Image: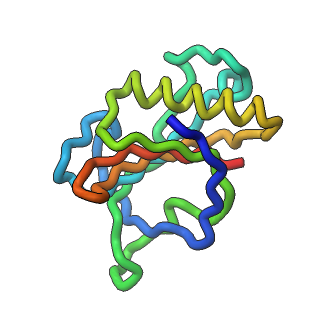
Amino acid sequence: MEIQILTLLTPLFYTEADSDPFCYREGDGEKLYCFMLNESESSGFEPDKEALLDRLIFSASAVTRAQGGTVKALPEGSYLFAQKREILSREEIIDMAVEIQAEGLWRRLKPGNTLYLRYLFEDSRSVTQLYRPI
């Protein structure tokens, strides 16, 4: 897995939609989840994997700008970013989040206290993406 610094120049728009972030299935459409990270676990090289995700802030589905009721769910800005071209389990997502955190710390960056999980379908494959603000 390659971890990159991604600068998102425009926000991605979503509308709130209640769904479980760890029960995504192909065909569910593009989804975005935002988690608050545990403050004591989100700044070290070896966080407690069970405690890293503190709480789910929101869950959302992609929309076009023309639709009403949209929220700016993934704001413009710089992120530590990684993706895998498959749907990952909860454990695999947390492992990926830990790798992103360690990479950011190795680069002497200060990762933010939120984590975005995004699912989408691209090039005929399901994709799992993680974004960590820096």
Expressed as whole percent of the image width and height from the top left, the position of residue 29 reads: 24, 57
Between 71 and 79, which is closer to the camera in this rendering?
Answer: 79
Expressed as whole percent of the image width and height from the top left, the position of residue 107 reads: 78, 36
Expressed as whole percent of the image width and height from the top left, the position of residue 128 reads: 38, 44
Q: From the viewer's perspective, is residue 56 above or below residue 47?
A: below
Q: From the viewer's perspective, is residue 93 above or below residue 5?
A: above
The residue most toward the right is 108
Specify the color scheme. rainbow
Q: How many marks?
A: 0
Between 89 and 37, which is closer to the camera in this rendering?
Answer: 89
Residue for point 34% across, 47% down: 127
Residue for point 30% across, 38% down: 87
Q: From the viewer's perspective, is residue 61 above or below residue 113?
A: below
Residue for point 68% across, 32% down: 103
* In the displayed structure image, the side of residue 29 where residue 36 appears, left or right: right
Q: From the viewer's perspective, is residue 96 above or below residue 6?
A: above
Residue for point 45% across, 69% down: 13
The residue most toward the left is 27
* In the displayed structure image, the side of residue 8 where residue 126 appears, left or right: left
Q: Quadrant of residue 102?
A: top right
